[in-house]
Image (tube, rainbow, N blue to C red):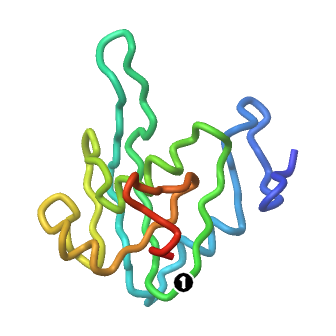
Amino acid sequence: MPSYWTGCKTDKENKSKVVYSALESKTQENCNLEVGVSVRNLTKIYGSGNKSKCSLNNLSVDFYANQITAVLGPNGAGKTTMMSIMCGLFPPTSGNVLVYNQDIMSNLAEVRRSVGFCPQHNVLFDTTSRKTF
């Protein structure tokens, strides 16, 4: 069955596993683009014990400088969690993120100079007024 987004063929035993994707093959080509954001082995677990929930499990991905990238996935896939960690809003359980070779955990102030994030919910503070805008 083809994928809605990429026309990928899927494994008949496990329809969620992508066997071939033209999009993935293009990404895997040896290119000379500069990596702007590098995510390596990123894991985020909320809660602990029986109430723990794994939002990201060993995610590794590169985002290239001067390229537009879309992050698509169903509700609960970890998109917002990934973006929030990449911007330093909260720490990962394990793994790391480099923004232009700066580790977000050790150089957060420097990273925030080159990262912007527009979250899915309005972020207004009690002291925000119409005059601010």
Q: How many marks?
A: 1
Question: x, y percentage for residue 35?
Answer: 38, 79
Q: Nearer the viewer, residue 49 or 84?
A: 84
In this image, 115 relative to 63: left or right?
left
Residue at the image position 42 percent from the left and 73 percent from the top: 116
In this image, 11 relative to 68: left or right?
right
Residue at the image position 58 percent from the left and 79 percent from the top: 68
Q: At numbered mark 1, what does the secondary structure look like: helix, strand or loop?
A: loop
The vertical placement of 132 against 74, above or below, is below
Question: x, y percentage for residue 19?
Answer: 69, 50
The vertical placement of 64 against 91, above or below, is below
The vertical placement of 13 against 113, above or below, is above
In this image, 53 relative to 130: left or right?
left
The vertical placement of 133 against 92, above or below, is below
Q: Nearer the viewer, residue 44 or 125?
A: 125
Say which residue label 1 marks. Answer: 67
Question: x, y percentage for residue 77?
Answer: 57, 41
Residue at the image position 44 percent from the left and 47 percent from the top: 81
Q: Nearer the viewer, residue 7 or 43?
A: 43
Residue at the image position 32 percent from the left and 56 percent from the top: 40
Q: Amino acid at mark 1?
A: Gln
Q: Residues within 10 Å of mark 1 (few under 14, many from 20)?
A: few
Q: Quadrant of residue 115?
A: bottom left
Question: x, y percentage for residue 66?
Answer: 49, 88
Looking at the image, the residue that sits furthest to the right is 1
Looking at the image, the residue that sits furthest to the top is 50
Q: Quadrant of the image for the N terminus? A: top right
